Amino acid sequence: MINVEFPYGKDKINYSFDENELINVLVSSVEEYNPGCSEEDLVIKAMENPTSSPKLSELSKGKDKVVIIASDHTRPVPSKVIIPYMLKEIREGNPNADITILIATGCHRGTTREELVSKFGEDIVNSEKIYVHDCDEKEKLVNIGTLPSGGECEINSIAYDADLLLAEGFIEPHFFAGFSGGRKSVLPGICSRKTVLANHCSEFIANKNSRTGILCGNPIHEDMIWACKTAKLVYVVNVVLNAEKEVIYAVAGDAIEAHKKGTDFLSELCGVKAKYSDIVITTNGGYPLDQNMYQAVKGMTAAESCVKEGGVIIMLARSNDGIGGDHFYRQLNEIDDINQGMKNILSKGRHETEPDQWMVQILLRILMRAKVIYVSQMPDKTVKDMNMIPAHSIDEAMDMAREILNKDNITITAIPEGVSVIVKGY
């Protein structure tokens, strides 16, 4: 038997597989990488040697209104490690700088005070100005031009009015933007819902280059780069994390060049090859990314890349925060025929995109390839409404999968961290 550990919420689930059935255990080489120093030292060294940029202390000289875009509660960014050093360097250059930390929620719900404290610590929450972006707060939005896609680019006015715009974040494979981090702090991070909808249109989601690990020719990425440059995001501190959410690599400097340096580093470590299998069991990396069903689609795309046509994906996502979007639920619940549902989405123009449509489109694409058994704490009815099969343990899900396949000589792939790998079939 081969034992595999899967993150689930803030816990771990261990499961033993028959060694004759388990043909792949796909793990990023990130887990083997040893940086040789502490998280703090990695961030400090990156900031002391910024990529294609002066140091932050130099950039902040004469800049009175400084804004740091920070990730929200759905991202495991170790802000407690990053933000204090950014604040320190800004104030070295300008002790009187008026600094605002702008929380990049994109179209997510607002981050709570409790979540802010968890991210930054009491001291920063109590002493610094923090503003939580709301994509529907029209009086806070400013139009900065037209995206390459043709959509209007509206960003938070706090960022627009800044003398110096900065961002923190982390880089991981992203299921349609190629990689997270860098330019994503602006789009979708601090944009209006209207802008995000135009960027996440069905045409772009369907593009063959809008996939994990791909930046070249990715139309979604190209929109994000334009927004980043036009909003004048000049400097970022981005990190790469291991499965324990510890910093193993850090980059700082120019928003475009530092991010590219980080994606180059990560792409060398997270690419994996896999033979196609009947059953693929995966996760969303545990907390915080498996808080809801909406986010969990990301981990499913890793399984999609190596499951056989007509196979079964078992998705482990605790989903303690529920579905993650009323629009996401409604659209999926209204679909009786998956193929027709996909046709309806693909018929929508880029200015007809509905909220959460992109996630529905990707989940439908996955469901057109394989059945999805969803292991969570969600009510069975809710999971069924989302066109998936509910289960509450790996044992239960595996029994269901075997029954669905109804065949001998089952092959299985395990992906303990579905959001941390770029899967390529043989």
Image (tube, rainbow, N blue to C red):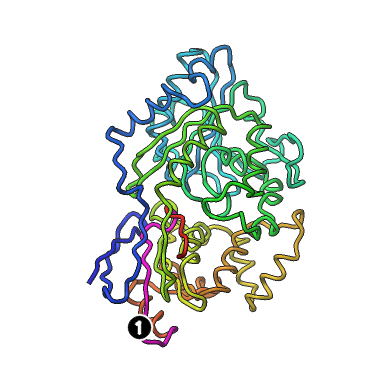
Give me the residue at 56% from left, 22% from top. 66
Residue pointed to by mark 1: 409
Verify whether residue 416 appears in magenta: yes
Q: Is residue 313 left or right of residue 210?
A: left
Q: Nearer the viewer, residue 98 or 248?
A: 248
Label 1 neighbour load within 10 Å: few <14, some 14-19, many 20+: few
Give me the residue at 67% from left, 70% from top. 342
Q: Position of residue 415 (x, y in %)?
A: 38, 62
Give me the residue at 72% from left, 34% from top. 142
Image quarter (top left, top right, bottom left or bottom right) of the N terminus: bottom left
Tag count: 1
Determine the residue located farthest toward the front in the rendered image. 426
Verify whether residue 36 appears in magenta: no
Q: In the picture shown, does residue 164 fall above or below 409?
A: above
User: Disc 1 marks which amino acid?
Assistant: Asn
Figure quadrant of residue 349: bottom right
Q: Is residue 260 left or right of residue 29?
A: right
Image quarter (top left, top right, bottom left or bottom right) of the C terminus: bottom left
**Range covered by the magenta-colored residues:** 404-419
Q: In the picture shown, does residue 352 fall above or below 142?
A: below
Q: Nearer the viewer, residue 67 or 201?
A: 201
Q: Is residue 192 left or right of residue 62?
A: right
Determine the residue located farthest toward the left in the rendered image. 1
